[in-house]
């Protein structure tokens, strides 16, 4: 095959440096989050009526698959960026819809277009963060020459992808808040209780969370004047709790927030509309 008849890499986005930093901040590259994100691809497949849907983020050298449906389970989790369709979706926040890959100047020489599985249709929906940076894509593909997306389907898939982007950003925010609170907790613990060890700290956090404490834990807390003889929090404990900004309600929400994700996603398709 001559040089002019080879699949060529896409131009690098002008905001690439900022985009790459945003991808790194997600913290999901090389992390198995399939159970968390698979619902998006299942819904995308259902909305599009296409056999394949996948979600991936793209850094400077590769596309990392968060999850996919309709592809072999044993396929590699990442692909070289320069070999992907989705690199072409990084330069715009609008969907990239290719109804006939065999006729598109960007895709017609790609090996999976010229050879098995002979991809005909590609729809790439950019995952855009609040700063307008494209982190990756949610995609649907089909080998059927009659495959198409109408405007209603496109609108639904855009909304679905927006939900996915929001979830990624929420996870980033939660992780950063948790890291900040953990750092503050450790520093304040070291300052207030220099003799505290990890066992003492776990006992105190269990107390805040409302867990049932064992006799050993109770004794540790009594020794540090954090509970009284009635096993109730002392003023010292409450002041310390306030100082580290970790009241029991907040702590419980931090612990249980991830438990509600699947329940919320189960209702997603019903909430999506085209109005």
Image: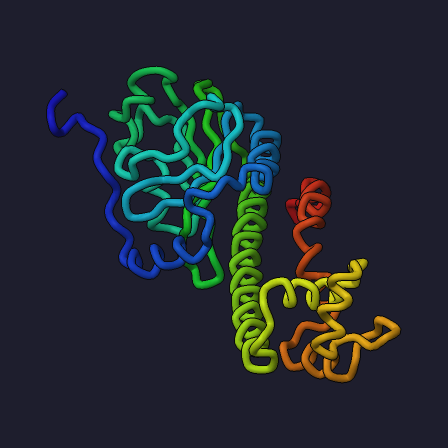
User: Colour scheme used in the picture?
Assistant: rainbow
Instruction: Give the image location of residue 25, x and y in percent.
Output: 43, 58
Placement of 19 over or under 125, stated as above or below: below
Q: How many marks?
A: 0
Instruction: Give the image location of residue 169, x and y in percent.
Output: 52, 57
Instruction: Give the image location of residue 242, x and y in percent.
Output: 69, 80
- The residue sitting at the left extreme is 2
Position of 80 with respect to 64 (left or right) is: left
Residue 249 in sight here: no
Position of 236 with respect to 160 (left or right) is: right
Q: Quadrant of residue 21?
A: bottom left
Position of 115 with respect to 4 (left or right) is: right
- The residue sitting at the top extreme is 116
Instruction: Give the image location of residue 199, x and y in percent.
Output: 63, 62
Determine the residue positioned at 58% across, 39% down.
Answer: 40
Q: Nearer the viewer, residue 143 or 18?
A: 18
Q: Quadrant of residue 15?
A: bottom left
Q: Quadrant of the N terminus?
A: top left
Q: Nearer the viewer, residue 227 or 267?
A: 227
Determine the residue positioned at 53% across, 23% down.
Answer: 51
Placement of 272 over or under 218, stated as above or below: above
Q: Quadrant of residue 42?
A: top right
Q: Nearer the viewer, residue 263 or 227?
A: 227
Residue 44 in sight here: yes
Determine the residue positioned at 51% across, 59% down.
Answer: 172
């Amino acid at each position: 095959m001559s040089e002019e008849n080879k699949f060529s890499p896409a131009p690098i986005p002008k905001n690439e440096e900022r985009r790459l930093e945003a991808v790194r901040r997600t913290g999901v590259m090389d992390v198995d989050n399939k159970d968390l994100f698979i619902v998006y691809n299942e819904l995308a497949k259902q909305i599009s009526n296409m056999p394949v849907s996948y979600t991936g983020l793209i850094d400077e050298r590769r596309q990392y698959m968060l999850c996919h449906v309709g592809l072999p389970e044993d396929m590699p989790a990442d692909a070289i960026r320069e070999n992907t369709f989705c690199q072409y979706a990084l330069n715009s926040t609008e969907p990239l819809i290719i109804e006939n890959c065999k006729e598109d100047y960007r895709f017609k020489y790609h090996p999976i277009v010229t050879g098995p599985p002979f991809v005909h249709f590609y729809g790439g929906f950019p995952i855009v963060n609040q700063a307008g940076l494209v982190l990756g894509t949610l995609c649907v593909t089909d080998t059927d020459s009659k495959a198409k997306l109408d405007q209603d389907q496109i609108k639904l898939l855009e909304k679905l992808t927006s939900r996915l982007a929001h979830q990624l950003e929420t996870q980033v925010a939660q992780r950063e808040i948790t890291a900040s609170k953990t750092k503050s907790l450790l520093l304040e613990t070291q300052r207030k209780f220099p003799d505290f060890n990890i066992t003492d700290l776990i006992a105190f956090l269990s107390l805040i969370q409302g867990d049932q404490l064992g006799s050993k834990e109770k004794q540790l807390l009594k020794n540090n004047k954090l509970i009284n003889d009635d096993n109730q929090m002392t003023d010292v404990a409450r002041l310390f709790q306030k100082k580290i900004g970790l009241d029991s309600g907040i702590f419980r929400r931090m612990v249980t927030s991830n438990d509600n994700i699947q329940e919320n996603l189960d209702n997603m398709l019903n909430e999506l509309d085209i109005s």
